[in-house]
Amino acid sequence: MQEKKKHYVRPLNIKNGKIEMNYGAGGKASAQLISELFAKYFNNEYLMQGDDGAYLPAAEGHIVMATDSHVVFPIFFAGGDIGSLSVHGTVNDVSVCGAKPLYLSAGFILEEGFPLADLEKIVKSMAEEAKKAGVYIVTGDTKVVEKGKGDGIYINTTGVGVVPKGIHLSGANCKPGDVIAVSGDIGDHGIAIMSQRANLGFETEIQSDSASLNSMTEALVKEIPSLRCMRDPTRGGLGTTLNELATQSKVGMKIEEAKIPVKEQVAAACEFLGLDPLFVANEGKLIAICGPEDAEKMLEIMRANPLGKNAQIIGTCVEDENCFVQMETSFGGTRMVDWLSGEQLPRIC
């Protein structure tokens, strides 16, 4: 009879196992979840220090920090999942400040009974997207709530990056005459989520645009001296983000409907659902504003990136003490693009 190994611990049953309350209790079960799942995929020299926080090397330049909590439903959607989204969202928040994103933290709130197989998919997705973006997940936390007290999984990510010396991008920098560009088709993410949530079954599957934009933002920071600001139009979409920037800079904005890129199937879905694509969320699009002298170069840089191949210049900043955003419609009229009132699509990120 074979002698039983001392200190043997049964491995996690990833295939059929589920989250239990003791996984969040800080004991052996917590340590096993961390070592066999999180550390397995997030493995790097900073995370593996094993302390309550990560010791990170000093970096030259200004530090930028951003945080975001992700509660998207469904957690798996066409074009991504809550894990990839949590990396993309925070990488982009740091990147549009002009920073090179370096490190992420990841906090998980898990509901009792959540399948370990789904958690592994999400963690793998996060690890893959962090690697693509060139960032390290260096620290984290896990909490477990009772069944019925959560919605499977929520993730908080915090990002840290460094802005090169001499760079200061801000939504308060825009001036009359500046040019406004968007990096591609708007509304993809919100409609992808809504179509799956409502089981609408559109003939053409709409994919989320969720992606990390730091390769594009780094090129713009390096090559466009008159770059005023960048912003990712997530919740509230393009329309709300332009209003935010206009208010910060105390300018008006005039945009042209005919120049705003929207996929036909997204436009059709918005019409069917009674939504305005200007206010539908994006997770892989970028608004960039620069001086008119650099407008064409800015557009070229965007279009040279696979994530910006359909970039367009959509308008300009103008003098306006009321800070209105106005749009010339396809019919030749003018429409006010006001702040979004309420929430068109809840829980899209």
Image (tube, rainbow, N blue to C red):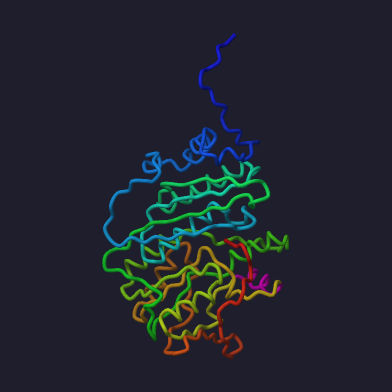
Query: Overall secondary structure of the magenta stretch?
Result: helix
Q: Which residues are magenta?
A: 263-272
* Residue ID at (53%, 79%): 259
Where is residue 164 shown, x and y percent of the image? 29, 63
> How many numbered circles are shown?
0
Compared across the picture, whether 154 is left or right of 321 comes to: right
**Residue 278 is one of the magenta-drawn residues:** no
When the figure is inspected, residue 55 is found, relative to residue 302, above or below; the finding is: above
Q: Is residue 110 left or right of residue 88?
A: right
Give the camera-side residue of 113 and 259.
Answer: 113
Q: Residue furthest top?
A: 1
Q: Is residue 100 above or below residue 272?
A: above
Where is residue 171, by image quadrant?
bottom left
Residue 198 appears left or right of 108: right
The quarter holding residue 209 reads bottom right
Q: Position of residue 79 (x, y in %)?
A: 58, 56
Percent x, y of residue 260: 54, 77
Place of residue 343 in the rendered image (x, y in percent of width and height, measured from the top left): 62, 71
Taking the spot 58% from the left edge, 64% from the top edge, the residue there is 189
Q: Quadrant of the N terminus?
A: top right
Residue pictured at 59% horizontal, 91% vertical: 333
User: Per the image, is 271 magenta?
Assistant: yes
Q: Quadrant of the C terminus?
A: bottom right
